[in-house]
Image: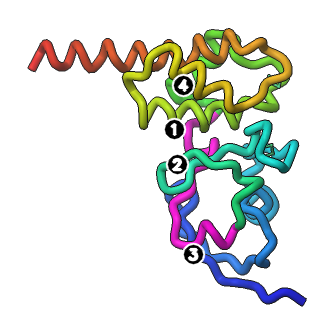
Amino acid sequence: MSEEHLIRTTVNGEERELLVSPRETLAEVLRERLRLTGTHVSCQSGICGVCTVVVDGDAVRACLTLAVQADGCEVRTVESLGSVDEPSELQRAFIEERALQCGFCTPGFLMLASWFLRVRPRATDEELLEAMSSNLCRCTGYRGIVNAVRKVRDTAAARAQTQEESS
Ligand code: FES
Ligand code: FES
């Protein structure tokens, strides 16, 4: 029988202590123990990106991350972005740009995009396209997804410019 490990991790700003088995993935812990089912799972081999979450500021595949690796880390899932009643700017842009159809890939794209916009706020269109290509969508053809992320990037840039000019 495999020994369980106590991990302490901060998930969406809340401190959690959990006993996990050495083979349990972060995706399993998020979905099955913490009921954060916004993190989806599909390929379980790092290809599709539906399980993307942010760990200590990096976008990671939760299906390939062991829960024990999250010990002492700060984890953010799609639930941290906004809610149905109060969607984030990025979530609103996904709706406005019709960046989803079935929605299965959407949590992964939202987390990938929120991470990317934070680390590369002035990314070029090419860089943005390359970053979004690391996740798979079987419905939309990607145009809406890319337009939504671009819209948030451009709005933030315009806001920063206005602030610069008025200071
Ligand atoms: S389920 Fe994690 S990359 Fe596909
Ligand atoms: S919206 Fe269906 S897989 Fe992307």
Whichever of labels 2 and 3 marks the residue nearer the N terminus, that label is 3
Whichever of labels 1 and 3 marks the residue nearer the N terminus, that label is 3
Q: Residue at x 23, y 14 (%)?
A: 161
Helix, strand or loop at label 4? It is helix
Query: Within the image, what quadrant is residue 96 found in?
Result: top right
Query: Within the image, what quadrant is residue 52 found in?
Result: top right
According to the picture, the residue beneath numbered tag 1 turns out to be: 115
Labelled pair 2, 4 in contact (Cβ < 8 Å): no
Q: Is residue 21 left or right of residue 14?
A: right
Labelled pair 1, 2 in contact (Cβ < 8 Å): yes
The amino acid sitting under disc 3 is Arg
Specify the quadrant that holds the C terminus. Answer: top left
Q: Quadrant of ligand 1?
A: top right
Instruction: Please provide the residue range marked out in magenta.
Output: 67-83
According to the picture, the residue beneath numbered tag 4 turns out to be: 90
Q: Nearer the viewer, mark 2 or mark 4?
A: 2
Label of residue 58 in the image: 2
According to the picture, the residue beneath numbered tag 3 turns out to be: 8
Mark 2 vs mark 4, CA separation in Å: 18 Å
Specify the quadrant that holds the N terminus. Answer: bottom right
Q: Is residue 137 above or below residue 19?
A: above
Mark 1 vs mark 4, CA separation in Å: 11 Å
Please state the horizontal and vertical placement of residue 165, each as a whole percent of the image: 14, 13
Whichever of labels 4 and 3 marks the residue nearer the N terminus, that label is 3
Please state the horizontal and vertical placement of residue 73, each as a whole percent of the image: 52, 65
Mark 1 vs mark 2, CA separation in Å: 7 Å
| Mark 2 crowd level (few <14, some 14–19, many ≥20, 10 Å Cα) | some
